[in-house]
Image (tube, rainbow, N blue to C red):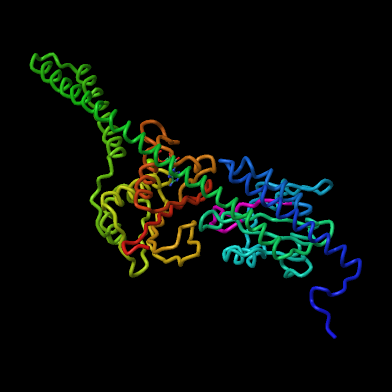
Amino acid sequence: MRAPAHSTPTSPADDDSAQELLQRRDAILGGVARATELISQTSHWRDCAQKLLQITGEATGVSRVYIFEIRRNAERVVCAYQTFEWVAPGVSPQIDNPDLQGIPFEAAGFGRWLAAFERGEPIFGDIADFPPEEQPILEFQQILSLLVQPIRAGRHLWGMIGFDACARPQRWERVEIDALRIAAVAFGAAVQREEREAALQQMQRVEALGRMAGGVAHDFNNVLTVASGATEMLAGELGGRGVLDTSSQELIEALQQALAQGAGLTRRLLQFSRQRQGQPRDVEVFEALRAATPLLRQILGHEIALELRASPGTPTIHIDPVDLEQTILNLVVNARDAMPSDGKLSLEVDHFETAEDHVGPDGVPPGRWVRICVRDTGCGMSAEVSERIFEPFFTTKASDRGTGLGLSTVFAIVHGQGGRIAVSTSPGKGSEFRLYFPTTSGR
Ligand SMILES: Nc1ncnc2c1ncn2[C@@H]1O[C@H](COP(=O)(O)OP(=O)(O)O)[C@@H](O)[C@H]1O
Ligand SMILES: [Mg+2]
């Protein structure tokens, strides 16, 4: 006779562990509820990250909980960087372990993890059952078993949250894994909210500054026009009276030179502030770049090599050709300024499609994209500089060379187009700007 399933006899030991499991499950569900509530109430995810780790750490009874951010390093390799950690009493923290900063997934033997995260799936289990190439890094941290959930900000893989059991292996129940996934999803939503707000604020700042700069430049231009006219007249007057000697001639020339510089500056300000009433049309990017080559050559001079490449059949993008040219010019001028005379500038155009539910390169959302890569062999940038380059008026150049408006203009144009922009650079290693534009046929 078979016993009904619900009355299967259990030993007292099984009872105990079943009891324990139920308690842990309750604790985890309670912890996740508190964690998601906390996340939904804070406007800056950084402010709640530590508390989130503590709550979920205590609820799961693990030894260590941590957040890694996932991004590309200067060589464009996808790496994980530990940014937050909570440890149970008596467990050795790993937050200062330099080996956990910038782990390249593939090269470190964690390609399996990255692939799972990109599918939105967690990694969990006993380390002893993991592939051998993954074990050394994990065993070094005395981890016996773990659960790691991906964190997505919208559609792009932003990071991961992990739970390490070091005291004894921990078996993860499906419901626990799912509950912790909810916490990761809530956290990712908070990150995305903040990223969106930051991008919006940046756009608004650029717009506000543009309006202000436009107003000032307009008035200033009137002043310059009057001053230029008066200088002309003064020169004529002195000449007519035969009293234009060498020293007054030099003074007048200095005046005229300063006025010309002022006019150049106002022209750039006006260009920057131009309310974007462009005339967009379908543009073949490669053709547009080829047409601009003579101009680019002129900017670069003869010493710097220029390479232009495109993958065949690149679709069109819908943009004002003037805007596109302006964008490329600004990037090329910067590259020239950063390069020694024997430098090399490459412009590359290609296109690709990111399927629904997939993350494109540099986190572009699903759709069809044209990518323009502008790469130079120049001095590159430190992290402090590259973080600020899109700020209006941020420049590292002498005041007569840089206005700090080039890249904020590029930013405004690309984002106004529904596009994206990404940069890879490090000191001494050159820079690469990648611009993504949605194709005409779009999404
Ligand atoms: N290709 C590049 N290589 C090195 N640094 C760059 C490059 N492009 C931009 N930068 C840095 O970004 C800053 C801002 O650029 P931009 O907005 O064009 O203003 P500006 O060129 O007037 O300084 C530059 O001053 C420079 O420090
Ligand atoms: Mg510039």
* Left or right, 197 with reference to 29: left
Does any portion of residue 97 appear in the rendered image? Answer: yes
Magenta span includes 74: yes
Instruction: State the extent of the magenta-drawn residues as a range.
Output: 65-79
> At 81% from the left edge and 62% from the top edge, which residue is drawn?
169
> At 16% from the left edge and 20% from the top edge, which residue is drawn?
230
Determine which quarter of the picture holds residue 26.
bottom right
Q: Note whether 408 is above or below 360 in the view shown.
A: above
Query: In the image shown, does 422 or 358 lie closer to the viewer?
Result: 358
In the rendered image, residue 11, in percent from the top left (x then y), is placed at 91, 70
Query: In the image shown, does 253 or 2 lie closer to the viewer?
Result: 2
Query: In the image shown, does 429 or 384 lie closer to the viewer?
Result: 384
The residue positioned farthest toward the left in the image shown: 240
Magenta span includes 192: no
* Left or right, 201 with reference to 161: left
Does any portion of residue 72 appear in the rendered image? Answer: no
Quadrant where the C terminus lies? bottom left
Query: In the image shown, does 283 or 348 lie closer to the viewer?
Result: 283
In the rendered image, residue 435, in percent from the top left (x then y), is placed at 40, 54
Q: Quadrant of ligand 1?
A: top left
Quadrant where the N terminus lies? bottom right
Q: Main secondary structure of the magenta part?
A: strand
The residue positioned farthest toward the right in the image shown: 12
Q: Note whether 66 is above or below 367 in the view shown.
A: above
